[in-house]
Image (spheres, rainbow, N blue to C red):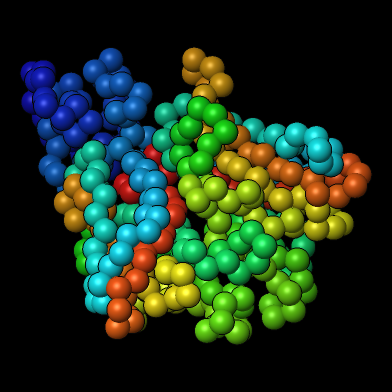
Amino acid sequence: MRTQPTDPAITDHGGLVTLPEQHHPPVETVVVQINGTSIAPGLSTQTFALTYSGHQIARAILRGPITVDVVGNAGAYVVGTDVADQSAGFSMVPSGIANYPTTYMGGYSRLHGDSYLSELVFAVGGFIVLKDVRINGSNLELVFQNVSGVNKTLICHGLVVVK
Amino acid sequence: MRLVDPLEHALDHAGYAASLTVDQHHIKPSNIQVVNTTLVISPLPGGPGQWDIALPFEALAVMFSFRSEHIVAEGGGMAGVTGVARRDSAYNTRTTVASLGGHAQTVGYGSYNCIYSKAASSLHLSHKVFSSGGADIALTDAWIETTGPTTRVLRTWWTNFSAGNKTLWVSGQVAVLG
């Protein structure tokens, strides 16, 4: 029996039917271009709509505005999941900004209980940290936290691959 | 109507390709080992050196890891770069790369460890660590290019900052994510 499904990539396999957990949507890529969003002190979730639901893994490489050399920037390299606070990653803040006179590079894991996934590199001068990368239904969510007492401008560029 | 064995499901599309477009299809992840120690790249103001790595035609996104011969730490750690790339049709602004490691012998003595993003118009995606015998060639860009009706490649561009010709020196792996 063949059917004409509404979502071909999810269900159109010539009438074959699979359980949701057996299926796998096509890989998607999300270009992150947050270039000056003001956020208040506290958490801020930046949401990106995906074409498909059912993704389980997010690979994110995100850079902030803090320049650490003539061309490079600080940022984070994170693997996220479809469950909140199970992400882990690698972040770097090489020397070059006033508040960080030495190089910081390290691994972070929300699953281990680390409070964040990066240093404070997602605003000019610091103060915004990456808290989590996760898939929520058909959305990709990047959770940031402004740890200062005043509004800060979030800047984040990168590419996220979900599958 | 029948259920699909989950172990077979990933491959069980061969007889049904007509009902799926290429972009809707999803292939199994695969790994491609790569090496290039022969590509001679001219210095600026010449154009970038180009190295194409063949991919499955259905590839939508890849993760790559390239290492150089440049030592960055005691014990023999090498400079390199890792990142992700997606499909684009021309020189793009959408590849994002984390570059790990840099010029110097040890972290703390001028080593450069940075995140790059073409989405933020970075000029390059790595430091100049990919030439044999010196730090003169940088990864400039990487994206998935369609080269024919049934062929796609990971197109990589490399820039030589020295005064004379240099030979690219790269080994690594390209993981086709899907």
Q: Quadrant of residue B72?
A: bottom right
Q: Can residue A160 be seen here?
A: no
Residue A92 vs residue A8, the one in the foreground: A92
Left or right, B86 with respect to A38, comes to: right
**In the displayed structure, would residue A153 be above or below residue A158?**
below
Q: Quadrant of residue B143?
A: top right
The percent position of residue A90, horizontal first and vertical second, equals 47, 70
**In the displayed structure, would residue B91 be above or below residue A75?**
above
- Image quadrant where one finds the N terminus of chain B: top left
Q: Quadrant of residue B128?
A: bottom right
**In the displayed structure, would residue A159 be above or below residue A92?**
above
Figure label count: 0
- Residue at (37, 59) in percent of width and height: A36
The percent position of residue B164, horizontal first and vertical second, equals 91, 44
Q: Can residue B91 be seen here?
A: yes
- Residue at (16, 51) in percent of width and height: A137
Residue A45 vs residue A15, the one in the foreground: A45
- Residue at (64, 50) in percent of width and height: B124
Farthest front residue? A150
Left or right, A157 with respect to A67, comes to: left
Left or right, B177 with respect to B18, comes to: right
The percent position of residue A68, horizontal first and vertical second, equals 61, 69
